[in-house]
Image (cartoon, grey):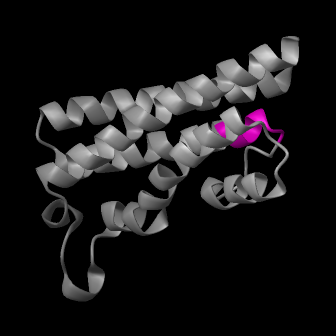
Amino acid sequence: MKVNNDIAYRFLLAEGFLGEAEEDFSLKRWRSCVSGSILSIENCGIAVLMLFGVSRTAHHPEVHLSQLLAEGTVSEEVADLIRDLLPELERHASHEKMLAKYGREAGYESPWDIFSEEQADVSLIGARKSLLITRKLRELLETASQN
């Protein structure tokens, strides 16, 4: 089934970007660590959306997942996991991704000057947490669909 392949691919991306972010952190490449962490978190959000049948081309998973919660159609256990994931998606959304790519152009502050070890650590922790939550959601939803 193509959907399962698409979801597996999102997990591959999330895990790969997290692995790169871990390596970048160990090499003290703070900007790269933040960028990889953001991409991992974003792919986790898209994977979760796909678990609910939302297109893989959807942007801003935090918006769609908030709407899903508002609909009240998921179990409390699933809703709690999504609520745990949302802050990471919101914290590491478009603005931070743009800073990692372009810096603060108006002030000529490059991406390498913006991010510190602390920011890299926060984003890396967020990526690890996001992947853990996403794995739990997949397991929970796959188990529920088999029953």
Horizontal placement of 103 versus 56: left or right?
left
Q: Does the magenta stretch include residue 112?
A: no
Q: Is residue 21 toward the left or the right of residue 144 in the image?
A: left
Residue 142 locus on image (x, y percent): 76, 18
Q: How many labels does the image show?
A: 0
Q: Quadrant of residue 17?
A: top left
Q: Quadrant of residue 7?
A: top right
Front one among 145 and 114: 145
Q: In the rendered image of this protein, does residue 60 appear above or below residue 105?
A: above
Q: Main secondary structure of the magenta part?
A: helix
| As drawn, 99 above or below 59 | below
Instruction: Look at the image and give the residue range highlighted in magenta.
Output: 48-53
Q: In this view, does 104 lie above or below 71?
A: below
Kindly give the residue lying farthest to the front in the view shown. Answer: 76
Residue drawn at x 20%, y 86% is 107
The quadrant of the picture occupied by the C terminus is top right
What is the x, y in percent for residue 104? 27, 78
Which residue is pictured at 57% across the width and 24% down the height?
Answer: 135
Locate residue 119 relative to residue 27 in the image: left or right.
Answer: right
